[in-house]
Image: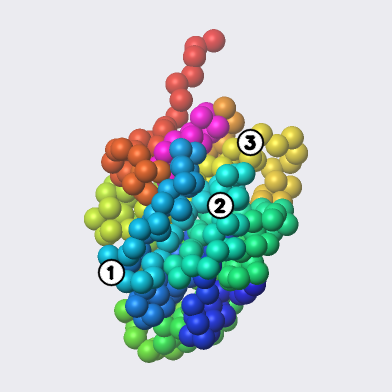
Amino acid sequence: MKIQPARLITELERRLHPVYLFAGPERLIIEEAADQVRRACRAHQVTERIRLSADGRFDWGDLARSTETGSLFASRRLVEVRLPTGKPGAEGAKLLRAWVEQERDDVLMLLADQWEMAQEKSAWFKALDKVGLFIAAWAVKPGQLSRWIDQRLSSRGLSADSTVCRFLAERLEGNLLAAAQEVDRLALLFPGARLTLAQVREAVADNARFDAFRLVELSLTGQAGAALRCIRGLRETDTAAAAVIWAVGREVEVAWQVATRRQPAAQSYRELQVWPSRQGPIEACIHRLGAARLEALIPRLSQLDRLSKGQAEGDFWIELERLCVALAQTPERRAA
Protein backbone atom coordinates (compact mmCIF):
# COMPACT_ATOMS: atom_id res chain seq x y z
CA MET A 1 0.00 0.00 0.00
CA LYS A 2 1.39 3.37 -1.01
CA ILE A 3 1.27 6.04 1.68
CA GLN A 4 2.62 9.53 2.28
CA PRO A 5 5.59 9.87 4.69
CA ALA A 6 3.43 11.75 7.21
CA ARG A 7 1.14 8.71 7.58
CA LEU A 8 3.90 6.26 8.48
CA ILE A 9 3.86 6.93 12.24
CA THR A 10 0.10 6.31 12.38
CA GLU A 11 0.49 3.03 10.50
CA LEU A 12 3.33 1.92 12.78
CA GLU A 13 1.24 2.66 15.85
CA ARG A 14 -1.44 0.33 14.50
CA ARG A 15 0.83 -2.63 13.72
CA LEU A 16 4.07 -3.79 12.14
CA HIS A 17 3.77 -4.75 8.50
CA PRO A 18 5.90 -7.62 7.16
CA VAL A 19 7.49 -5.45 4.44
CA TYR A 20 8.45 -1.78 4.05
CA LEU A 21 9.80 -0.26 0.83
CA PHE A 22 11.18 3.28 0.86
CA ALA A 23 12.45 4.48 -2.50
CA GLY A 24 13.53 7.64 -4.26
CA PRO A 25 16.23 10.31 -4.47
CA GLU A 26 15.33 12.22 -1.29
CA ARG A 27 17.61 10.55 1.23
CA LEU A 28 16.35 12.49 4.26
CA ILE A 29 12.80 11.16 3.80
CA ILE A 30 14.08 7.61 3.36
CA GLU A 31 16.38 7.66 6.38
CA GLU A 32 13.80 9.24 8.68
CA ALA A 33 11.19 6.69 7.59
CA ALA A 34 13.69 3.88 8.20
CA ASP A 35 14.44 5.23 11.69
CA GLN A 36 10.72 5.24 12.49
CA VAL A 37 10.46 1.58 11.48
CA ARG A 38 13.51 0.69 13.59
CA ARG A 39 12.01 2.38 16.66
CA ALA A 40 8.69 0.61 16.11
CA CYS A 41 10.48 -2.72 15.78
CA ARG A 42 12.29 -2.19 19.08
CA ALA A 43 8.97 -1.34 20.74
CA HIS A 44 7.63 -4.69 19.49
CA GLN A 45 10.69 -6.56 20.83
CA VAL A 46 12.22 -6.95 17.37
CA THR A 47 15.72 -6.23 18.63
CA GLU A 48 17.98 -8.07 16.17
CA ARG A 49 18.87 -6.17 13.00
CA ILE A 50 20.44 -7.65 9.85
CA ARG A 51 21.81 -5.28 7.20
CA LEU A 52 22.57 -6.22 3.59
CA SER A 53 23.57 -4.15 0.56
CA ALA A 54 22.48 -5.44 -2.85
CA ASP A 55 25.27 -3.95 -4.93
CA GLY A 56 26.67 -5.47 -8.11
CA ARG A 57 28.46 -8.26 -6.21
CA PHE A 58 25.55 -9.17 -3.94
CA ASP A 59 24.48 -12.81 -3.65
CA TRP A 60 20.72 -12.80 -3.15
CA GLY A 61 21.04 -16.17 -1.49
CA ASP A 62 22.40 -14.23 1.50
CA LEU A 63 18.90 -12.85 2.08
CA ALA A 64 17.45 -16.30 2.63
CA ARG A 65 20.50 -17.59 4.53
CA SER A 66 20.47 -14.61 6.90
CA THR A 67 17.18 -15.79 8.40
CA GLU A 68 17.54 -19.55 8.11
CA THR A 69 18.95 -19.97 11.62
CA GLY A 70 17.13 -19.00 14.79
CA SER A 71 17.60 -15.54 16.23
CA LEU A 72 19.96 -15.23 19.20
CA PHE A 73 18.07 -12.35 20.76
CA ALA A 74 14.43 -12.45 19.67
CA SER A 75 11.88 -14.48 17.76
CA ARG A 76 11.68 -11.77 15.08
CA ARG A 77 14.33 -9.83 13.19
CA LEU A 78 14.48 -6.67 11.14
CA VAL A 79 16.20 -7.41 7.82
CA GLU A 80 17.32 -4.29 5.95
CA VAL A 81 18.34 -4.51 2.30
CA ARG A 82 19.68 -1.44 0.52
CA LEU A 83 19.10 -1.35 -3.25
CA PRO A 84 21.53 1.23 -4.71
CA THR A 85 19.93 1.07 -8.17
CA GLY A 86 16.37 0.37 -7.04
CA LYS A 87 16.35 -2.77 -9.21
CA PRO A 88 16.84 -6.21 -7.63
CA GLY A 89 17.44 -7.98 -10.93
CA ALA A 90 15.83 -11.27 -11.96
CA GLU A 91 17.24 -13.32 -9.08
CA GLY A 92 16.43 -10.67 -6.48
CA ALA A 93 12.91 -10.17 -7.82
CA LYS A 94 12.28 -13.93 -7.56
CA LEU A 95 13.55 -14.14 -4.00
CA LEU A 96 11.61 -11.06 -2.88
CA ARG A 97 8.39 -12.55 -4.23
CA ALA A 98 9.17 -15.82 -2.46
CA TRP A 99 9.79 -13.91 0.77
CA VAL A 100 6.32 -12.32 0.85
CA GLU A 101 4.58 -15.54 -0.22
CA GLN A 102 5.99 -17.38 2.79
CA GLU A 103 4.75 -16.86 6.33
CA ARG A 104 7.62 -15.16 8.17
CA ASP A 105 7.85 -13.47 11.52
CA ASP A 106 10.74 -11.27 10.40
CA VAL A 107 10.27 -7.72 9.10
CA LEU A 108 11.83 -6.84 5.73
CA MET A 109 12.77 -3.23 4.93
CA LEU A 110 14.03 -2.26 1.46
CA LEU A 111 15.80 1.08 0.97
CA ALA A 112 16.14 2.05 -2.70
CA ASP A 113 18.46 4.96 -3.50
CA GLN A 114 17.05 5.27 -7.02
CA TRP A 115 13.55 4.68 -8.31
CA GLU A 116 11.63 4.68 -11.58
CA MET A 117 7.85 4.71 -11.86
CA ALA A 118 8.08 1.68 -14.16
CA GLN A 119 9.26 -0.38 -11.18
CA GLU A 120 5.77 -0.10 -9.71
CA LYS A 121 4.45 -2.26 -12.55
CA SER A 122 6.85 -5.13 -11.84
CA ALA A 123 5.64 -8.41 -10.36
CA TRP A 124 7.98 -8.23 -7.37
CA PHE A 125 6.78 -4.73 -6.46
CA LYS A 126 3.11 -5.72 -6.73
CA ALA A 127 3.74 -8.71 -4.46
CA LEU A 128 5.37 -6.50 -1.82
CA ASP A 129 2.71 -3.81 -2.20
CA LYS A 130 -0.05 -6.27 -1.28
CA VAL A 131 1.37 -7.03 2.15
CA GLY A 132 3.52 -4.02 3.02
CA LEU A 133 3.87 -0.25 2.88
CA PHE A 134 5.54 1.80 0.16
CA ILE A 135 6.77 5.40 0.44
CA ALA A 136 8.09 7.20 -2.64
CA ALA A 137 10.62 9.82 -1.53
CA TRP A 138 10.54 12.29 -4.39
CA ALA A 139 12.50 15.53 -4.24
CA VAL A 140 10.54 18.49 -2.91
CA LYS A 141 9.86 21.00 -5.67
CA PRO A 142 11.01 24.62 -5.20
CA GLY A 143 7.46 25.86 -4.82
CA GLN A 144 6.78 23.33 -2.05
CA LEU A 145 9.91 23.85 0.05
CA SER A 146 8.59 26.88 1.97
CA ARG A 147 5.60 24.86 3.20
CA TRP A 148 7.85 21.91 4.07
CA ILE A 149 10.06 24.21 6.18
CA ASP A 150 7.01 25.64 7.93
CA GLN A 151 5.89 22.11 8.88
CA ARG A 152 9.39 21.19 9.99
CA LEU A 153 9.63 24.26 12.22
CA SER A 154 6.29 23.38 13.78
CA SER A 155 7.45 19.82 14.49
CA ARG A 156 10.38 21.28 16.45
CA GLY A 157 8.20 23.61 18.52
CA LEU A 158 8.95 26.72 16.44
CA SER A 159 6.77 29.02 14.38
CA ALA A 160 7.46 31.62 11.71
CA ASP A 161 5.62 33.65 9.13
CA SER A 162 5.78 33.03 5.38
CA THR A 163 8.57 35.60 4.90
CA VAL A 164 10.94 33.61 7.15
CA CYS A 165 10.04 30.33 5.45
CA ARG A 166 10.60 31.81 1.99
CA PHE A 167 13.96 33.22 3.09
CA LEU A 168 15.11 29.79 4.30
CA ALA A 169 13.74 28.12 1.16
CA GLU A 170 15.68 30.51 -1.07
CA ARG A 171 18.88 29.88 0.86
CA LEU A 172 18.55 26.10 1.06
CA GLU A 173 17.35 25.66 -2.54
CA GLY A 174 15.73 22.26 -2.30
CA ASN A 175 18.21 20.42 -0.06
CA LEU A 176 16.00 18.78 2.57
CA LEU A 177 18.92 17.41 4.55
CA ALA A 178 20.45 20.87 4.90
CA ALA A 179 17.01 22.33 5.64
CA ALA A 180 16.44 19.81 8.43
CA GLN A 181 19.84 20.60 9.95
CA GLU A 182 19.14 24.34 9.77
CA VAL A 183 15.79 23.92 11.50
CA ASP A 184 17.35 21.78 14.24
CA ARG A 185 20.00 24.46 14.76
CA LEU A 186 17.35 27.18 15.03
CA ALA A 187 15.48 25.03 17.58
CA LEU A 188 18.62 24.95 19.72
CA LEU A 189 19.20 28.70 19.39
CA PHE A 190 15.58 29.80 19.89
CA PRO A 191 13.67 27.01 21.70
CA GLY A 192 9.90 27.38 21.45
CA ALA A 193 10.14 30.80 19.79
CA ARG A 194 8.24 32.50 17.01
CA LEU A 195 11.12 33.33 14.71
CA THR A 196 11.62 36.75 13.20
CA LEU A 197 13.38 37.40 9.91
CA ALA A 198 16.11 39.36 11.73
CA GLN A 199 16.83 36.42 14.06
CA VAL A 200 17.04 33.95 11.20
CA ARG A 201 19.22 36.22 9.05
CA GLU A 202 21.70 36.63 11.90
CA ALA A 203 21.76 32.90 12.65
CA VAL A 204 22.31 32.08 8.99
CA ALA A 205 25.12 34.61 8.71
CA ASP A 206 26.86 33.09 11.76
CA ASN A 207 26.78 29.67 10.14
CA ALA A 208 27.50 30.66 6.53
CA ARG A 209 31.29 30.36 6.71
CA PHE A 210 31.32 26.62 7.13
CA ASP A 211 28.18 25.33 5.44
CA ALA A 212 28.11 23.04 2.42
CA PHE A 213 26.55 25.65 0.15
CA ARG A 214 29.40 28.04 0.84
CA LEU A 215 31.83 25.27 -0.12
CA VAL A 216 30.05 24.81 -3.44
CA GLU A 217 30.11 28.52 -4.20
CA LEU A 218 33.82 28.81 -3.38
CA SER A 219 34.68 25.80 -5.56
CA LEU A 220 32.58 26.92 -8.53
CA THR A 221 34.05 30.42 -8.48
CA GLY A 222 37.67 29.20 -8.39
CA GLN A 223 38.56 29.97 -4.75
CA ALA A 224 40.54 26.83 -3.98
CA GLY A 225 42.25 28.05 -0.80
CA ALA A 226 39.02 29.27 0.75
CA ALA A 227 37.30 26.01 -0.26
CA LEU A 228 39.94 23.99 1.60
CA ARG A 229 39.47 26.09 4.72
CA CYS A 230 35.72 25.62 4.43
CA ILE A 231 36.14 21.82 4.19
CA ARG A 232 38.21 21.81 7.36
CA GLY A 233 35.48 23.78 9.10
CA LEU A 234 32.83 21.32 7.90
CA ARG A 235 34.92 18.43 9.18
CA GLU A 236 35.53 20.04 12.57
CA THR A 237 31.81 20.69 13.03
CA ASP A 238 30.90 17.08 12.14
CA THR A 239 28.83 18.10 9.13
CA ALA A 240 27.06 15.10 7.61
CA ALA A 241 28.94 13.77 4.58
CA ALA A 242 25.64 13.17 2.78
CA ALA A 243 24.78 16.89 2.90
CA VAL A 244 28.15 17.83 1.40
CA ILE A 245 27.95 15.22 -1.36
CA TRP A 246 24.43 16.30 -2.27
CA ALA A 247 25.39 19.97 -2.53
CA VAL A 248 28.62 19.46 -4.49
CA GLY A 249 27.33 16.65 -6.68
CA ARG A 250 24.20 18.50 -7.69
CA GLU A 251 26.13 21.54 -8.91
CA VAL A 252 28.72 19.53 -10.84
CA GLU A 253 26.03 17.56 -12.65
CA VAL A 254 23.99 20.69 -13.39
CA ALA A 255 27.06 22.50 -14.71
CA TRP A 256 27.90 19.56 -16.97
CA GLN A 257 24.33 19.34 -18.31
CA VAL A 258 24.17 23.08 -19.04
CA ALA A 259 27.57 22.91 -20.75
CA THR A 260 26.59 20.00 -23.01
CA ARG A 261 23.03 20.90 -24.00
CA ARG A 262 22.62 22.45 -27.42
CA GLN A 263 20.29 25.22 -26.29
CA PRO A 264 20.51 28.59 -24.54
CA ALA A 265 21.73 28.37 -20.96
CA ALA A 266 18.64 30.23 -19.72
CA GLN A 267 16.42 27.47 -21.13
CA SER A 268 18.54 24.79 -19.47
CA TYR A 269 18.31 26.54 -16.12
CA ARG A 270 14.52 26.68 -16.40
CA GLU A 271 14.27 23.00 -17.30
CA LEU A 272 16.67 21.97 -14.51
CA GLN A 273 14.93 24.27 -12.00
CA VAL A 274 18.13 26.11 -11.09
CA TRP A 275 17.59 29.05 -8.78
CA PRO A 276 18.87 32.44 -10.06
CA SER A 277 21.33 32.75 -7.16
CA ARG A 278 23.13 29.59 -8.35
CA GLN A 279 23.43 30.47 -12.03
CA GLY A 280 26.35 32.93 -11.75
CA PRO A 281 28.77 30.52 -10.01
CA ILE A 282 27.76 27.70 -12.37
CA GLU A 283 28.44 29.90 -15.41
CA ALA A 284 31.86 30.81 -13.99
CA CYS A 285 32.71 27.15 -13.54
CA ILE A 286 31.59 26.21 -17.06
CA HIS A 287 33.65 29.02 -18.56
CA ARG A 288 36.73 27.99 -16.59
CA LEU A 289 36.63 24.19 -17.00
CA GLY A 290 34.46 23.31 -19.99
CA ALA A 291 32.24 20.28 -20.51
CA ALA A 292 34.97 17.63 -20.85
CA ARG A 293 36.67 18.44 -17.55
CA LEU A 294 33.32 18.62 -15.76
CA GLU A 295 32.38 15.19 -17.10
CA ALA A 296 35.69 13.79 -15.83
CA LEU A 297 34.79 14.86 -12.29
CA ILE A 298 31.48 12.97 -12.14
CA PRO A 299 32.99 9.49 -11.39
CA ARG A 300 34.80 11.05 -8.44
CA LEU A 301 31.42 11.98 -6.95
CA SER A 302 30.44 8.30 -7.01
CA GLN A 303 33.67 7.46 -5.22
CA LEU A 304 32.92 10.07 -2.55
CA ASP A 305 29.45 8.59 -2.09
CA ARG A 306 30.93 5.11 -1.57
CA LEU A 307 33.47 6.48 0.92
CA SER A 308 30.72 8.17 2.94
CA LYS A 309 28.88 4.84 3.21
CA GLY A 310 31.98 2.84 4.12
CA GLN A 311 31.83 0.94 0.82
CA ALA A 312 35.32 1.99 -0.32
CA GLU A 313 38.72 2.47 1.27
CA GLY A 314 40.09 5.96 1.77
CA ASP A 315 39.50 9.23 3.61
CA PHE A 316 36.30 11.00 2.58
CA TRP A 317 37.50 14.48 3.55
CA ILE A 318 40.83 14.17 1.74
CA GLU A 319 39.10 13.03 -1.43
CA LEU A 320 36.62 15.89 -1.07
CA GLU A 321 39.52 18.34 -0.87
CA ARG A 322 41.02 16.90 -4.06
CA LEU A 323 37.70 17.13 -5.90
CA CYS A 324 37.05 20.73 -4.84
CA VAL A 325 40.57 21.81 -5.81
CA ALA A 326 40.05 20.21 -9.23
CA LEU A 327 36.72 22.01 -9.51
CA ALA A 328 38.21 25.36 -8.49
CA GLN A 329 41.47 25.31 -10.45
CA THR A 330 42.05 27.12 -13.71
CA PRO A 331 43.49 24.72 -16.30
CA GLU A 332 46.75 25.74 -17.90
CA ARG A 333 46.28 27.05 -21.42
CA ARG A 334 48.67 25.96 -24.13
CA ALA A 335 50.54 28.72 -25.89
CA ALA A 336 49.36 29.33 -29.44
| Residue 68, position as x, y percentages in the image | 40, 57
| Residue at horizontal 37 percent and vertical 49 percent from the top | 309
Residue 180, relative to residue 99: is it above or below? Answer: below
Q: Would you call the spot at circle 3 few (<14 residues within 10 Å), some (14-19), or many (20 or more)?
A: many
Q: Looking at the rendered structure, which numbered label has been put on residue 95?
A: 2
Q: Quadrant of residue 137?
A: bottom right
- The residue carrying mark 1 is 73
| Residue at horizontal 41 percent and vertical 78 percent from the top | 40
Viewer-side residue, 229 vs 4: 4
Could you tell me what secondary structure mostly forms the magenta stretch? helix
In magenta stretch: residue 79: no
| Residue at horizontal 50 percent and vertical 58 percent from the top | 111
Viewer-side residue, 318 vs 190: 318
Mark 2: which secondary structure?
helix
Amino acid at circle 3: Ala
Amino acid at circle 1: Phe
Quarter of the image that includes the C terminus? top right
- The residue carrying mark 3 is 259
Residue 103, relative to residue 318: is it above or below? Answer: below
Viewer-side residue, 22 vs 154: 22
| Residue 187, position as x, y percentages in the image | 36, 80
Viewer-side residue, 79 vs 248: 79
Q: Would you call the spot at circle 2 few (<14 residues within 10 Å), some (14-19), or many (20 or more)?
A: some
Alpha carbon of mark 2 to alpha carbon of mark 1: how far?
Answer: 25 Å
In magenta stretch: residue 304: yes
Q: Which span is picked out in magenta?
A: 293-305
